[in-house]
Image (cartoon, rainbow, N blue to C red):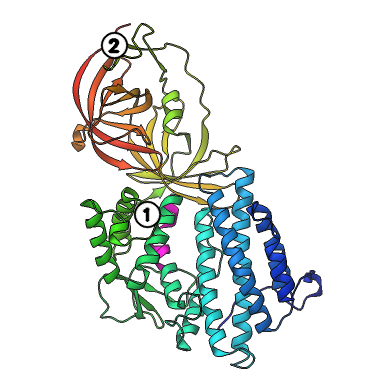
Amino acid sequence: MFTLHVPSTDDPATKLAVETRPKATAAWLERLPFASPVDVARQLVEALVALNRHPLDANERYALLALYRPVAVKTALSLEALLAESGVPPHAQQRQIGMLLRELLSELGIGYKHVVLAGRNAAGHGLPPRRFAEAAAWLIASLRDVQIAFYMTYHPLPAGMWREMHQVYLLAHATGAADKAVGEVLPASLAYRQALLLALADPPQMSRDELAHTRLYLHKLGTLAALRPATGSNAQTGFVVATDSDSGPGQPALQQEGELWLDTDALCRQLRDIALRLRTGDSPNSIGLPQGMQSGLSLSLGKRLLKLWRTGAQRAFKRYPATRGTMQVVAGVSCIHRLLGGEQPAEDSTADPDDSLPIHDVRPLHASPIAVCTSHWTVSNDSASGLALQGAPDEPLNLKVGDALALRSDEAAGWSLAVIRWIRMRDERQVELGVERLSPEMQPVWVRPLRGHRSGNAEPALFIPGLPALKQPDRLLLSRQVFQPGMDAEVWHPDRHTTLAFGRRVEHTPSFDLIDFTVIAHEPTHD
């Protein structure tokens, strides 16, 4: 049964003052204070809430939505930009921006739900077939954008969203309009495939930059994914879409009536070719990727998407219910460095500031370490490689995917190193983190890059001792922007001073680089 959840337009209690004259609406939209996206978003939400609860002819509503849509999309992009550097739990202002973004796009989608329902119930009367097809395509695009807003703010998707998207796609397909471009909107099938692929990309494990790049990849490659009825002879590269469920695409299982098959074979072949060309030095622009894609991030993300968009991705280790209670957490390379007693090095005041040679006489200050606040989390499950944490911190911690963490289970235990792999917000305060263990121990060090004949500033870093049992060498974890391939650097340990050459970058996140290195020379530190 075809059902879309919309607010009632017949309840007098929900009636609000609303402008329904197109010319007056257009004039009001032009006067909005676009220099303040939050104020614009708030006014748009109030107007759309009133419009979506007001009885209107489908054609009238459609004409008004055509005026609202470009303004709403422009405002949503501005809100996204304001959220670019926010983490979780969000500050009050960031929380308000995220809420406005979700509400704005949700109310725009509700408007198109009204139009599609009215057009379908009219059985072709009162809404021209072309307009009905266009409204259905705009609705799927709107639902996809609502999903993105929830992904961007790490909130779970609203109940019923996938079920509605499946129904609208099947309706567009039944009317022969799913693959047709109507007006300015993408074909309904393409917006639907983009939504399916985005869900498969595992947004909770993405930084906002990665999410933005994934959207650009979908803009470029989304047409290569194909939808067809699920059969026993489907290709190996693809996913089942259960259209009678409230869930996105999943792994192949027993075939059920009405299922679709999302074939990603051509998509993965093209993505593999792009990754190869990026790895051999081609720029994103030279191989036709959209404007705004960066070589390093495009390559690392492309390789990750290639794994996720192929059938068969499995969890490496089984997770088990928690048995260890709570966990203390400190986030960020600088905070972890202070936590472990790292002290700011002081340069020799007698050194010649114009000397072009590296300055080696650098001594740590033996001052008391700066106190670092820890947060406390409940361990919800555990595995050989990581664990899931949940909590409701009293203060905004601004945690992000890719942040380094120091963990310990109690005051007597030592601190271990980990990284945030995914984030979810269950409500405005309750946070869930997926954490991968990187090392059972670490040491604070200071690293000063040697750029040519000049020395850079000393930067806090973490020395990660090697694990002989895993044939893993010693490594350095550096704050972002410190690493450059092949660069020499000076490193100060509590008991020695080392000169080394940066080697291979083992891992890169928005917060740190984990690298190998080669020791050039070392000597004891003298008091």
Mark 2 or mark 1, whichever is nearer to me: 1
Which residue type does callout 2 highlight? Answer: Thr
Q: Which SS type dominates the magenta stretch?
A: helix
* Label 2 environment density (alpha carbons within 10 Å; few <14, some 14–19, many ≥20): some
Q: Mark 1, residues whose alpha carbon is within 10 Å: few (<14), some, or many (≥20)?
A: some
Q: Is residue 350 left or right of residue 465?
A: right
Q: Which mark is residue 525?
A: 2
Name which quarter of the figure residue 286 lies in.
bottom left
Q: CA distance from mark 2 to mark 1?
A: 45 Å
- Give 373 or 186, whichever is nearer the viewer: 186
The answer to whether the residue labelled 2 contacts the one labelled 1, judged by CB atoms less than 8 Å apart, is no
Residue type indicated by callout 1: Met
Q: Residue at x 41, y 12 (%)?
A: 365
Residue at point 37% right, 23% down?
457
Quadrant location, the N terminus: bottom right
> Circle 1 sits on which residue?
293
Is residue 169 visible in this depiction of the protein?
Answer: yes
- The stretch drawn in magenta includes residue 92: no
On screen, residue 47 versus residue 192, left or right, reads right
Provide the residue span drawn in magenta: 196-206
As drawn, the residue found furthest toward the front would be 354
Residue 356 % position (x, y): 28, 17
Q: Provide the secondary structure element on which disc 2 rests.
A: loop
